[in-house]
Image (cartoon, coloured by chain):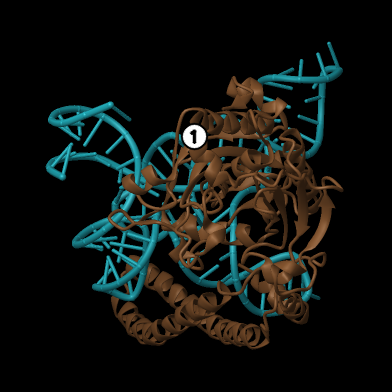
Chain colours: A brown, B cyan
RNA sequence: GGUGAGGUGCCUGAGAGGCCGAAAGGAACAGUUUGCUAAACUGUCGUACGGGUAACUGUACCGCGGGUUCGAAUCCCGCCCUCACCGCCA
């Protein structure tokens, strides 16, 4: 959620920046500001009436104590009259504020000045390419969904039976590979100074609102209606919400957390060949990294997180590129996002495996997540997060790129975790 | 699921219609003293939103939402949550 004072003081700047996300926000911003002006006008009036009521109530108390009941009765009547007008004013203020907030939460975050203009994924800016020549596979190379059944390591049909499409069953070395990747990613995060947590994988509505999934993406989450909970689409939600309504000490920043969780996404509206196999699942595993940062440091930290994720991909020996997302391809809450895509040789396409974002104060404002320097006023912190990493497409790329006549080669860094160097 | 107790500031915890934005202790911060540390003493110490160049000032907030009252942390109603015990159970 954008900060109202920023909207008031830098209206033109906000409108110009939202234009990078291809949004013409002028009418909305002006509506918010006029509601705000109206609200404040009513609020000032209301508060002066309340001040008078409070003064009268105090006087009545004193009159009662000194036995002047008649005078007290006069004041009572006066106060009752005031109550009428304060009550209606209060309703007005509350409804103006509500109306204003309802509109304010629909505005996406303003992109950072680094964000390139653009509408489609093709206009994302390639900022890094891990290799100048992409691996080439023999003509009979297979896509991963054929390899998974050839080696019987991931069973999509069995998942269909148990749950439905997008819920695969990992088997044998396939299951062990999952476990190996999760442990590998967690160990790496630990080494990089991230504190490991295991959060709930169901969240309440307040948490969903805090990180911006609600009300914007309600339809993308599985909803447990009986209890009002949602299955998490990413560990970002429960981990960042650890700090909801918190004022942390300035010197404790940056706070670095990591968590492994399953993630659940309804992916309503997705279809076609690009959802085949592991490319798009309803349930998948991911290790997430989250940082709570000082506003002056958050962009430096974003670069750190980006190079951390790149390091993981190098260790896994996967060819990848890093994109700086253009305005049109960015998420609602993000100010700057880097996507990491690995090259899937058999599919001849790039697969997104990580998204690293700085949300600046956008989430913190919803979360009421603040920090305080010694004796200072509370300030909104910046929040950042990134996948480090999401498993399915890593597995897809690994299977496809590393296929040999003998079997699937496991990258060196992973062998201590899998306990085998070949899937055959 | 049943029964009982309870939700007050960073924490513990008092407060039971007006003198309460809230005692007391602890923590934290600043200072004094001691050679350092520790201790002792003194002071500061909630948040949000308004108004004001500012000093300052107003309002709201004691789990959430309503109600009673001139006046509610305190009384009434509804909801949520936590804890304890019982039941069930990995």
Residue A398 location (% of width, % of height): 65, 39
Determine whether, in the image, residue A26 is placed left or right of residue A80: right
**In this rendering, does residue A227 appear at all?**
yes
Image quadrant containing the C terminus of chain A: top right
Q: Pick whichever, B54 or A218, lies toward us.
A: A218
| Circle 1 residues within 10 Å: few <14, some 14–19, many ≥20 | many
Residue where numbered disc 1 is placed? A153
Q: Residue at x 73, y 79 (%)?
A: A19
Name the image quarter holding residue A100. Answer: bottom right
Q: How many marks?
A: 1
Determine whether, in the image, residue A150 is placed left or right of residue B16: right
Name the image quarter holding residue A211. Answer: bottom right
Q: Residue at x 56, y 31 (%)?
A: A177
Q: Pick whichever, A398 or A65, lies toward us.
A: A398
Residue A56 location (% of width, % of height): 42, 76
Chain letter of the residue carrying label 1? A
Determine whether, in the image, residue A232 is placed left or right of residue A249: left
Residue A386 location (% of width, % of height): 66, 48
Q: Residue at x 62, y 57 (%)?
A: A364
What secondary structure is marked by label 1? loop
Residue A278 location (% of width, % of height): 54, 48
- Relative vertical location of residue A131 with respect to residue B35 in this rendering, above or below: below
- Relative vertical location of residue A131 with respect to residue A209 in this rendering, above or below: above
């Amino acid at each position: 959620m954008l900060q109202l004072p920023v909207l008031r003081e830098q209206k033109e700047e906000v409108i110009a920046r939202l234009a990078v996300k291809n949004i013409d926000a002028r009418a909305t911003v002006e509506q918010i500001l006029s509601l705000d002006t109206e609200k404040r006008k009513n609020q000032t009036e209301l508060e002066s009436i309340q001040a008078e009521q409070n003064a009268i109530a105090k006087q009545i108390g004193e009159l009662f104590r000194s036995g002047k009941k008649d005078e007290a009765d006069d004041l009572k009547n006066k106060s009752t009259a005031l109550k009428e007008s304060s009550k209606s004013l209060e309703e007005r203020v509350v409804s103006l504020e509500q109306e204003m907030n309802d509109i304010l939460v629909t505005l996406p975050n303003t992109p950072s000045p680094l964000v390139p203009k653009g509408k489609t994924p093709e206009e994302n800016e390639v900022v890094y390419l891990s290799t100048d020549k992409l691996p080439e596979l023999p003509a009979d190379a297979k896509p991963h969904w054929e390899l998974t059944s050839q080696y019987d390591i991931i069973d999509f049909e069995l998942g269909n039976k148990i749950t439905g499409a997008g819920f695969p069953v990992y088997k044998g070395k396939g299951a062990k590979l999952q476990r190996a990747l999760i442990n590998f990613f967690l160990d790496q995060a630990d080494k990089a100074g991230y504190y490991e947590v295991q959060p709930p994988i169901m969240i309440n509505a307040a948490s969903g609102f805090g990180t911006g999934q609600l009300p914007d993406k309600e339809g993308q989450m599985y909803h447990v209606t009986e209890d009002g909970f949602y299955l998490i689409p990413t560990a970002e939600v429960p981990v960042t919400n650890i700090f909801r309504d918190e004022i942390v000490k300035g010197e404790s920043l940056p706070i670095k957390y990591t968590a492994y969780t399953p993630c659940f996404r309804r992916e309503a509206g997705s279809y076609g060949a690009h959802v085949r196999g592991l490319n798009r699942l309803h349930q998948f595993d991911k290790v997430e990294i989250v940082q709570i940062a000082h506003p002056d440091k958050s962009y430096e930290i974003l670069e750190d997180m980006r190079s951390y994720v790149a390091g993981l991909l190098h260790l896994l020996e996967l060819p990848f590129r890093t994109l700086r997302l253009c305005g049109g391809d960015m998420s609602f809450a993000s100010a700057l996002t880097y996507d990491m895509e690995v090259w899937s040789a058999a599919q001849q396409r790039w697969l997104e495996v990580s998204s690293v974002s700085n949300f600046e104060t956008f989430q913190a404002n919803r979360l009421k997540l603040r920090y305080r320097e010694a004796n200072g006023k509370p300030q909104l912190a910046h929040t950042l997060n990134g996948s480090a990493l999401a498993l399915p497409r890593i597995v897809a790329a690994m299977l496809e790129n590393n296929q040999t006549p003998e079997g699937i080669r496991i990258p060196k860094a992973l062998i201590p975790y899998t306990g085998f160097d070949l899937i055959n």
